[in-house]
Amino acid sequence: MSRGPPSEVFSAAFGGHHGAMPRVVVVGAGFAGFHAARRLIRLLGDRAEIAVVNPNDYFLYLPLLPEVAAGLLDPRRITVPLVTRLPGATFRLGTVTGVDFPARTVRYRPPEGDEQLLTYDKLVLSAGSVNKLLPIPGVAEHAHGFRSIAEALYLRDHVVEQVELADETDDPAEQEARLTFVVVGAGYTGTEVVAQGVRLTDTLIRRYPRLSGRRARWLLVDTADRVLPGLSEELSRRTRQVLDELGVDVRLGQSVTEAHMRGVRLADGSDLPSHTLVWCVGVRPDPLVENLGLDIAKGRIVVNEYLEVAGHPDVWACGDVAAVPDLTRPGEITAMTAQHAERQGRRAAGNIAASLGVGYRRPYRHHDLGFVVDLGGADAAANPLGIPMSGLLAKAVTRGYHLFDLPGNRLWTAASWLLDAVAGRSPVRLGLVQREEVPLEVTAPR
């Protein structure tokens, strides 16, 4: 197809939207949706309307969320306003509740008022994921999730509060429980949370003479036999070495069987007195997926290698909601990672543009470019292009990657890192988010 189609190519292809030009609706503005919308704007320009429906007015750069919880970054550094980064797109602030495919309409609930309908000619389903829950007694009531700005801010306040309460008590057992923090899930998020958490509590405890000589106890619990089980053994080994040096109590081959106000119980029968349980066991597709009536595989929408939804020629799905065939590993589907979501969003946009006569339709094929894990301080582990590294070199690669991938606020973020290295951080409890505002089942920003 040509890259400069005449207007009749567009007008002949549509019947669902009654406007002067075709409308492409993007559901969600996470890694998949944001990058899909961004590329659609670049490819289609003023020849199509790009409409984005999202509960928030920003794109959240999730990989740096642990640094917000640790008091290293201001949350504004990792939230990028959609209106400035997606110029030319139209926005609908709200949560999508359903899709009528025959009528080509998206139903969404705005922050105020009744549900609204939005017609589409092309649709991108990229609603993202939410915290993964397991049927373990007490977890939903007492654990803290970690998928949103609100959850990160609450966790930071909670950790600061526990150190303050530990300083106030004269009961050694109570002090021990206040200074014990349990993180469940030794994947990417849990590993970074625990590493950043150690450095945060070390900073906090130095403020209190009564706690002199004490150190908070951080535990990392997972049923796997190694940390970062989804990544290479070399990256896992290097990360484990850093965690051991930080004093993290890593409990592998273990799971939480019960949680309560005063602690948790593990599968081996051990009880851990604690007031903090951070839930990082993984994610599941947004609940919207269950209500669409589409074919599902492993909880995700079935698509082909072009990210097209079967039986719906004008609908694409990408990111965590889509079961995308992994062409580099036949028979498997791609992992739920930001790296895949970002690239799938771009590929979906390219294929939508091709359906409108711009460019060519291509399958999604992505070879793993490696991963980076920031472990706070001068520590990191990385394997760019399969080359394992650690220490300062890995730290430079890790931060360089994030600055490159962050679609805004780069200067502010780099300045924050520099100030932390020179002057240190001074986290305080702000009380902006209350416990009841971040129940574990709360959904993450799309």
Image: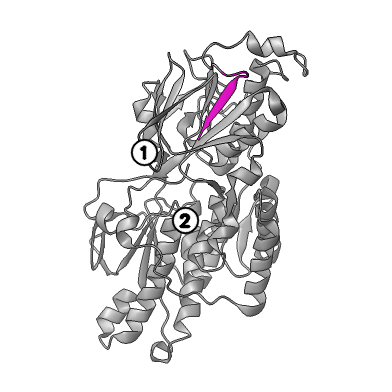
- Residue at image coords 71%, 13%: 7
**Which quadrant holds the N terminus?**
top right
Q: Is residue 26 magenta?
A: yes
- Quarter of the image holding residue 278? bottom left
- Residue at image coords 58%, 39%: 34
N-terminal label among 1 and 2: 1
Question: Residue 265: x and y, percent?
Answer: 25, 61
Q: Which residues are magenta?
A: 19-27
- The residue under label 2 is 149
- Residue at image coords 70%, 15%: 357
Q: Amino acid at mark 2?
A: Ile
Q: Does 378 sit above or below residue 257? A: below
- What whole-number distance in Å separates the C-alpha atoms at marks 1 and 2? 25 Å
Question: Residue 132: x and y, percent?
Answer: 36, 45
Indicate the secondary structure of the residue bearing disc 2.
Answer: helix
Q: Does 252 sit above or below residue 112? A: below
Question: Residue 430: x and y, percent?
Answer: 43, 71
Q: Nearer the viewer, residue 241 or 292?
A: 292
Indicate the secondary structure of the residue bearing disc 1.
Answer: loop
- The residue under label 1 is 113
Applied colour scheme: one colour
Q: Nearer the viewer, residue 201 or 223?
A: 201
- Residue at image coords 64%, 46%: 84
Which of the two discs, 1 and 2, sits closer to the camera? Answer: 1
Question: Residue 123: x and y, percent?
Answer: 52, 24
